[in-house]
Image: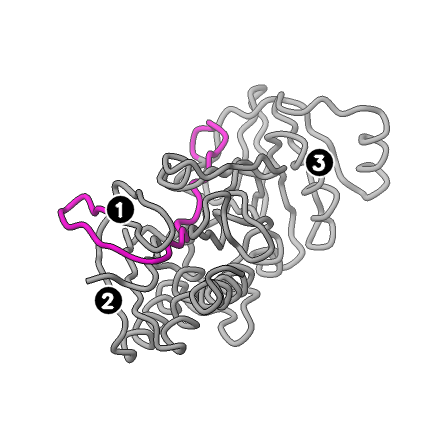
């Protein structure tokens, strides 16, 4: 059986794209490894109509709604290879099975490369975050720490005083020039240049000189890369952004390979659930147009 579109990645962007296509009565296959990026978070915020809802519940509800469309096929598994050309693509799943489709959409999300600080990874999504719009309000204007990883961290520290009293922990990752230092100070940001030993308790920072700083929450700018190398292995061009690598696409969400599209966190910055859903909906509509107007 040949599907109209194979969607690799069944999280928010992938399902949003699939919904548009299913409503156009296209045969859609979704291959999902079940590894949502926000699986560590207990609540999703900033998504209209779903504010404060468990992100797993949002995903379950969305899948249930997709499954009401008979043209949907859902495969749980990890896509291991993808190949082919426009109108004749194939994707193989690790557990066995090869599927064919006229178009291919990568909605695989990204992997967060976190700073190697003891105690940080287990607090990711719980008391250490990347997006103030998603998690800043719940800190109730308490003390906020920004752990530097690079140039994007300065931007985080400049923005976060909207949500609380900010301390910028440079941790040897950023050398502030006089202009940046002055800007942060004018915004009321405290600068802490002692290196971090580890994170303890909920969101406390133990410094290498023995001091312990307590915060309501911490933010850090992870470097993002596509969660799977499939798109790159096919030959899709990647693009370096201030947040890391993503799959290069044009305005219609088509990659540098004709017939292969990408959307969501893997193909845009910045990142949030609502932005991923919007990007997926647009990609789904553009995929449909590519099937209706193949030479367009």
Q: Is residue 275 left or right of residue 80?
A: right
Within 10 Å of disc 1 (Cα), the crowding (few <14, some 14-19, many 20+) is many
| Front residue (pair 278, 256) | 256
| Front residue (pair 160, 260) | 260
- Of the 4 image quadrants, the one containing the C terminus is bottom right
- Of the 4 image quadrants, the one containing the N terminus is bottom left
Q: Distance between the residues labelled 1 and 3?
A: 37 Å
As drawn, 259 above or below 64: above
- Secondary structure under tag 3 reads helix
Residue shown at the point (66%, 37%) measured from the top left: 152
- Secondary structure under tag 1 reads strand
Residue shown at the point (50%, 52%) measured from the top left: 254
**Residue to which mark 3 is pinned:** 154
Q: In this view, does 184 lie to the left or right of 266?
A: right
Q: In this view, does 98 lie to the left or right of 68?
A: left
**Residue to which mark 1 is pinned:** 79
**Residue to which mark 2 is pinned:** 73
- Residue interval drawn in magenta: 92-119
Within 10 Å of disc 3 (Cα), the crowding (few <14, some 14-19, many 20+) is many
Q: Magenta includes 95? A: yes
Which residue in the rendered view is the most extreme toward the front? 295
- Secondary structure under tag 2 reads strand
Spot occupied by residue 93 in the image (x, y as percentages of width and height): 21, 47
- Sequence-wise, the earlier of marks 2 and 1 is 2
- Sequence-wise, the earlier of marks 1 and 3 is 1
């Amino acid at each position: 059986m040949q599907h109209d579109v194979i969607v690799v990645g069944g999280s928010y962007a992938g399902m949003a794209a699939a919904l548009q296509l299913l409503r156009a009565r296209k045969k859609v296959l979704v291959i999902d490894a079940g590894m949502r990026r926000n699986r560590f978070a207990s609540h999703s915020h900033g998504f209209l109509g779903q504010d404060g809802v468990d992100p797993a519940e949002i995903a379950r509800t969305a899948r249930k709604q997709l499954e009401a469309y008979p043209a949907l096929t859902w495969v749980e598994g990890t896509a291991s290879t993808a190949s082919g050309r426009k109108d004749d693509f194939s994707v193989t799943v690790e557990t066995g099975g090869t599927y064919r489709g006229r178009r291919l959409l990568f909605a695989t999300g990204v992997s967060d490369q976190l700073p190697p600080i003891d105690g940080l990874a287990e607090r990711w999504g719980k008391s250490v975050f990347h997006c103030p719009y998603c998690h800043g309000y719940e800190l109730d204007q308490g003390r906020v720490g920004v752990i530097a990883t690079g140039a994007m961290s300065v931007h985080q520290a400049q923005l976060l005083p909207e949500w609380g009293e900010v301390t910028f922990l440079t941790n040897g990752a950023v050398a502030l020039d006089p202009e940046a230092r002055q800007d942060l100070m004018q915004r009321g940001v405290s600068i802490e240049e002692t290196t971090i030993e580890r994170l303890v308790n909920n969101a406390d920072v133990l410094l290498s000189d023995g001091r312990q700083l307590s915060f309501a929450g911490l933010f850090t700018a992870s470097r993002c890369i596509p969660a799977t190398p499939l798109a790159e292995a096919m030959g899709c061009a990647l693009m370096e952004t201030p947040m890391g690598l993503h799959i290069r696409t044009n305005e219609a969400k088509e990659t540098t390979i004709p017939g292969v599209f990408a959307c969501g966190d893997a193909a845009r910055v910045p990142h949030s659930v609502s932005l991923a859903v919007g990007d997926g909906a647009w990609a789904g509509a553009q995929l449909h147009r590519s099937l209706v107007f193949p030479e367009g």
